Image (cartoon, rainbow, N blue to C red):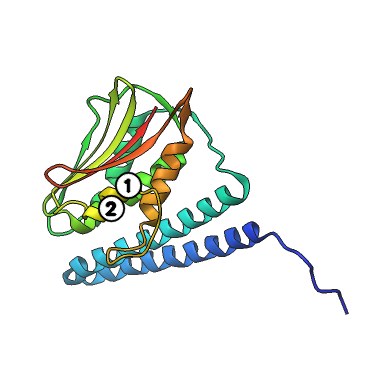
Amino acid sequence: MDDAPTEFDLATLAATEFHELKNQISELTFALDEVGSRHPEAAPDLIRLRLDCRSIMERLVEILTLYKSGQQGLRLNVEAHSPSELIEELVADCRGLAKNGVMIEAKTDKAPPFAFFDRYLIHIAMLNAMHNALRFAKARIAVGVEAQADGLNFYVRDDSEGYPAHILENQGRRPGRSSTGTGLGLFFAQTIARAHVNGDRRGELRLENRDGACFNLWLP
């Protein structure tokens, strides 16, 4: 009889399982789309279900990324990218998930032609912020990027009731369960922001309430 294995690569196992789960959730999303095409009257309910599926997939990616960062350190793939193209892609990706006529507007007029950042990780963090905004916005969401004197700021702004006080106090520094969730998405965004370093400056997640919730992912 073969000897039982004494060790295994947990990260590889987790990545394989997470990938399989993502595939299954993707298949579920396609099935919901097919149901929607056959039953248009069910579209409003299906939008929420599709949003839930997308959120689950994001959580899987975030958990795996954070696990790997704890084991190996977070490794960025920083290259020159167009911030405007990232924003346009996010908006196009999320417009089909908007409920009750919520308008999503891209703001790129103050964006630089290119900037250096990890596009994959920033995309995940911004997509999670977009999905949160879609849950709570009343009628409007603005998604944009702007060059600032000291860096680059990606943002998502909505017209919801704003962030609860405990979220503003925490600023994504620590995850923790509450009535509004675990805070994993904000913790992930703060981790990704702080991994972007320029000299002695680190990126930072900055949350505020200003006529609604304002998610700012600032990079140096």
Position of 86 relative to 185 (above/below): above
Q: Amino acid at mark 1?
A: Gln
Left or right of residue 191: residue 213 = left
Q: Which of the 4 image quarters holds residue 16?
A: bottom right
Q: Residue at x 85, y 74 (%)?
A: 3
Q: Nearer the viewer, residue 127 or 10?
A: 10
Residue 62 in picture, x, y percent from top left:
46, 54
Q: Is residue 41 left or right of residue 93?
A: left
| Residue 62 visible | yes
Quickly name the residue at label 1.
Answer: 171
Contact, mark 2 vs mark 1 (Cβ under 8 Å): yes
Q: Secondary structure at mark 2?
A: helix
Q: How many marks?
A: 2
Residue 168 place in picture, x, y as percent: 26, 48
From this view, report whether residue 58 is shown above or below residue 109.
Answer: below
Q: Mark 1 packing: few (<14 Cα in 10 Å), some, or many (20+)? A: some
Which amino acid type is shown beneath numbered disc 2?
A: Ile
Return the residue at label 2.
167
Say which residue appears at 59% left-offset and 62% top-offset: 14
Is disc 1 placed on a helix, strand or loop? Answer: loop
- Mark 2 Cα within 10 Å, few/some/many (few <14, many 20+)? some
Question: Where does residue 207 sit, x and y in percent of width and height?
Answer: 27, 43
Tell me the residue at 50%/31% (across/down): 78
Q: Residue furthest right?
A: 1
Residue furthest out toward the bottom = 1
User: For this rendering, which residue is in front, 175 or 34?
Assistant: 175
